[in-house]
Image: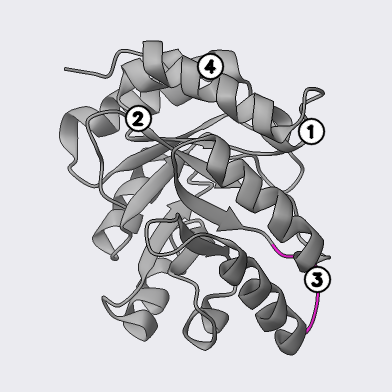
Amino acid sequence: MKPSAKPRIVLVTPPVDDAARFAQQLASACSAADVAAVILRLAPGDDATQIKRVREIVVALPPPAGPIIMLDGHANLVSKTAADGVHLHGSDLVSAARGALRNERTIGAGRLQSRHDAMIAAENGADYVLFGEPDASGRRPGLPAIVERLEWWAELFVIPCVAYAGKLDEMEDLVAAGADFIALGEEAVWNAPEGHARALAAAMVHLAVAEPTP
């Protein structure tokens, strides 16, 4: 993912089981906002089931200018599908994924516990780092901690950083702190009482008024 003048959105999906049904929702979501990438989370299943799910999602999105598709984990399935890359949890798996996927796919790293983890992920070949992503239990750092990490990264590193916004009203602060992309997931989009399309339209308003770091 390449940064642009204004930060763009990264959509994080809920765990997808019925891919054919969810593909329609995802396509409408991507039509409602400037979505650079989708981090596709999959419900449990065997490899054949997961490959089928990914393919059903990919064909529903508008090529060639549509968002890139990043599998959440499942690095072993990237080359077997039309996915563009993999989003990994922590820095430990980045090196092995880069060795397997070479420079042909995008690799991202989230759930980074420390500054050291983020630097190791970048050194091992991550194309972006994500700060503020919820852990397996749904907990995430407070907004001040995410802002501090973004400011540090933006000042020292060239590799793009993605910031996870739990609520839409966090977006301006994250952009001001140096986020190149804003990730939105279940809390802000998919579970929004007004529906995902209206939530994303509102997210675009927040991006329009946000002031990126000079």
Task: Quote the CA–CA distance across marks 3 and 2.
Answer: 31 Å
Q: Is residue 47 magenta?
A: no
User: In the image, what residue occupies the spot 36% across and 65% down?
Assistant: 106
| Residue position marked by numbered label 4 in the rendering | 170
Q: Which residues are magenta?
A: 42-46
| Residue position marked by numbered label 3 in the rendering | 44
Q: Position of residue 19 (x, y in %)?
A: 76, 66
Picture disc at residue 37: none
Task: Quote the CA–CA distance across marks 4 and 1.
Answer: 17 Å
Res. 34 visible in picture? yes
Count of numbered badges drawn on the protein? 4
Determine whether label 1 and label 3 are within 8 Å by CB: no
Q: Secondary structure at mark 1?
A: loop
Res. 139 visible in picture? no
| Residue position marked by numbered label 1 in the rendering | 191
Q: Position of residue 116 (x, y in %)?
A: 35, 46
Frontmost of labels 1 and 2 is: 1
Q: Position of residue 88 (x, y in %)?
A: 51, 61
User: In the image, what residue occupies the spot 48% across and 46% down?
Assistant: 112
User: Mark 4 or mark 3, which is nearer the start of the sequence?
Assistant: 3
On the image, which quarter does residue 47 sit in?
bottom right
| Residue position marked by numbered label 2 in the rendering | 179
Q: Amino acid at mark 3?
A: Pro
Left of 48 or right of it: where is 128?
left
Task: Quote the CA–CA distance across marks 1 and 2.
Answer: 24 Å
User: Mark 4 or mark 2, which is nearer the start of the sequence?
Assistant: 4
Q: Secondary structure at mark 4?
A: helix
Determine whether label 2 and label 4 are within 8 Å by CB: no
Task: Quote the CA–CA distance across marks 1 and 3.
Answer: 21 Å
In the displayed structure, would residue 82 be above or below residue 72? below
User: Mark 3 or mark 1, which is nearer the start of the sequence?
Assistant: 3
Task: Estimate how packed mark 2 is, as few (under 14), some (14 to 19) or many (20 or more) residues with alpha carbons within 10 Å.
Answer: many
